[in-house]
Every structure is written in C-alpha cells, then in structure tokens.
Image (tube, rainbow, N blue to C red):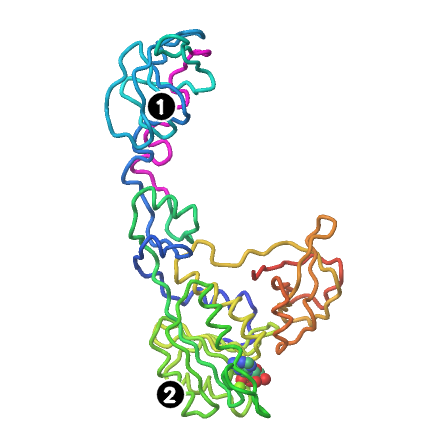
Amino acid sequence: MKTFISFTEARDIVLDHLPGPREDAIALDMALGKTLGQPIVAAENIPPFDNSAMDGFAVRAQDVPAPGICLPLAGEISAGCSDTHPLAPGACVRIMTGAPLPEGADAVLPVEVAEPHPAENSIIFLKAAIPGDHVRPAGQDMPRGRTVLEAGNVLGPADIAVLASLGQVQVPIARMPAVSIVTTGNELIEPSESLRHGKIRNANGPTLAAQIATAGGQLYGRFHAPDTREDVRSALEAACKGDMLVISGGVSVGDYDFVKDVLEDMGLSMLFWRVRQRPGKPLVFGLLGDIPVFGLPGNPVSSAVCFEAYVRPALASMLGRKNMLPRLEPAMLGKDIPKKRGLHHFVPGQARWVDRTLTVVPAGPQGSHIVSSLALADGLIHLPEALDGAPAGMSVSFERLR
Ligand code: AMP
Ligand code: MG
C-alpha cells in the first residue's frame, strides 16, 4: 500500500486497476449522452438513391450543352415519390429537393435558371447543364461499409442523426457502471430534516449522486452509516454489490474514522491512502474483489474535488470513453493564491476573458467546508505541488466543471 503519493501517481494507480467496458444496448430515443460500445458501420448507402439537391429540372446534361435550349416538360417528381419512370431522351422533368433522380438523368438545372416557354409545355434553360450538377449521389454521405462512428464516443445530437439515418434503433452502448454511495457520520441528517444542535445536512450523498449521473454512471444505491464499526460494516456490505463503491467520510485519523479498518476486515486490497493534494489528502483507494472502492474525505469540497480528480476519470475509463482525463485550459491567475509546497492544490475558481486572456480567480472564500464557493466556481484551478506560491500573473491550468 502506498501513502502520501502525488496526484498524478494516484490517478494512474486508479486507472490501472479498473475493469473494462461491458456491452449493453439501448433504444435510440434513450441514447443521448451514452457511450457507444461498438463502432457503427453503415449497412446501407446514405443517401440511398441519387437525388436532387435543388428545386429545378432533371435533364440529361448532353441535351443542354449551351444556354437557350428548350426541352419538353415530361412530368414532375416530388420528394418521397416512388415511381421509377426513366427520363426520355430530349425531355426534362420538374424535380424537387430530395426527390429521386429519374433513370437517365444526370444533372439538375435549378428553377432560377429555367423559364417556362410562353406557348408550349416546355422549359427554356438559361445555362448549360454539367453532368452531376446539383445531384446528390447515393452513398455520398455514408457509403455502405464505412465506419461512421467510433466506439467510445459520447453520443451527441449529431451522432443521433447518423444512427437515425441508418435505422439503428437499438444502439450498442457501454453499460453504465452501477455505483453505490455510502455516507458516514453521526452528525448527518437528511436534507428533508430540520436542523438540531450539532447536526448538519448530508450534502455529499445528493452531490455524489449528481456527479455520478453526469459522469455516465447509474446509482446502485445510497446508504448511510452512523460512526460505529458495526453500522459502517453493514452499510459497506450492503453497498459493495455494484460495479463501484464511493464512500464519503471516515477515512481520516479521527477516533470515529472506521472506514479503512472495516474495509480491510472485509478484504480490501488497499492501493493507496493519502495523496499530496489539497483538499482531499486522506483519500483511500483499493479493490474489494474487482470492485473499485474510493474512500473520499467527508468535507464537501474535498469529496467533490476527489470525485472530479479520480472517480469521474475512472467512470470514463470503465465506459471505454476515448477522453478519460479532464481537458485543462491554459489560463492566467488574476489574484495571488497562498500555496503550500508539496501539495497539489485544486482551487475552485471563476474564469473570465480579460483582454483576450482567460483569467482565473478563486471563487469566494476558500475552505474544504465552503460549499457555496464551489457553487460559484466555473472550475478548478490546478496549482502543481512543486510551487511554493501562486502570484497573480502566473500561468496555470484550469479545469472546467460546467
Ligand atoms: P470526515 O471525513 O468524516 O472526518 O468528515 C470531515 C468533515 O466533513 C466533517 O466536518 C463532517 O461533518 C463533514 N461531512 C462528512 N460527511 C458529510 C456529508 N455527507 N455532507 C456534509 N458534510 C459532511
Ligand atoms: Mg466523519
């Protein structure tokens, strides 16, 4: 078991000890935000047939070699039309955007360059036709056999458009890991209860549930344990049946911090305890069988920051997502921040563009118990452990949380 390791070493250990993605499938209507479990290969040409890109007239290009040609009008094809009359040589047919090109036609002349003949049922073209003009060939968007979406993509609206076009009504996705939450503490009451002296409301339970939902996980169950060995043990035993266990509180060195001991009694293979970071130093990580177990420190900002730094990337990895790690943006520090050498600081911060520079400042008063500042923050300012101060004007990395 390692202890007092760096943030990056701790995160690497976590990412090295996770099960891989598992297969699932979901209806197309429910697929938004899910992670694709298999590459999607076009089974059909899209578009499925040559069709018109404009409202105009379908012709054989060789029949309109120069401006001023007049061709008899042989009919009309609207979008959705299923007849298959070929275009007679030397004639034209009125055609709408998206309508199938008749056999024999190889170009469309838009209405803007066509005039009806004043007397006959024919059309005068003001431009020459070029083969292929304003024609959308079959398979131009997705030719049959092409891989159009990669496994590991988080499905957004454009991916839904691709899946719908291909008729992929059952979408292969990575199964959403089922995560249990165990909160600990004699001081905690539920948010619905009235405060009494000495009690605070359980903020981390609902917060972790929200973080899990936005990270692609699903809740296996939420449990709470008062600070006795027996209560902690029965909550952890009930909770350790999903794909991941996230515990809040009780991992520090207080007299009532039983979580580590109980986990070890239950057979946890502990991989590390305590990370050189602020907030969140007492973080524990290990495996119960093959279930990854995170013991997060109970202060709400510590719990939320540790979730972002370790649990969110872990869920992304278990989903097979391509980008597991948060994107860090370069930014300039707008205010001095007191900093202790030897700890990686995560500072809830606000980001503003000032003279074309992304400028970040701490969001409100800072402290691992000050939830309201986290709610004001756009993200986390990262201050690496080697720094022994963080003066205004310094270049830093910023991780957006919203
Ligand atoms: P612990 O990690 O159990 O020592 O808790 C550290 C601090 O976080 C204490 O002040 C606790 O009251 C507080 N705390 C622990 N769990 C929660 C929770 N679920 N919601 C809000 N505060 C908590
Ligand atoms: Mg506690």
Quarter containing the C terminus: bottom right
Query: Badge 1: how crowded within 10 Å, few (<14), some, or many (20+)?
Result: many
Q: Quadrant of residue 107?
A: top left
Residues tagged 1 and 2 counted as in contact (Cβ below 8 A): no
> Please, what is the three-letter code of the amino acid marked with disc 2?
Ser
Asked if residue 298 can be seen in this view, the reply is: no
Residue 143 sits inside the magenta stretch: yes
Residue found at x 39% / y 56%: 35
* Marker disc for residue 234: 2
Question: In terms of depth relative to the viewer, which is nearer, 330 or 81?
Answer: 81
Magenta span dominant secondary structure: loop
Mark 1 or mark 2: which is in front?
1
- Secondary structure under tag 2 reads helix
- Secondary structure under tag 1 reads strand
> Please, what is the three-letter code of the amino acid marked with disc 1?
Ile
Vertical arrangement, residue 106 with respect to residue 277, above or below = above
Residue 325 as seen in the image, left or right of residue 379: left
Query: Badge 2: how crowded within 10 Å, few (<14), some, or many (20+)?
Result: some
Which badge, 1 or 2, is on the more N-terminal residue? Answer: 1
| Residue located beneath label 1 in the image | 95
Question: In terms of depth relative to the viewer, which is nearer, 235 or 95?
Answer: 95
Residue 220 sits inside the magenta stretch: no
Residue 144 image position (x, y, % from top left): 29, 36
Tell me the quadrant of ligand 1. bottom right
Magenta region, residue range: 125-148
Residue 367 as seen in the image, left or right of residue 117: right
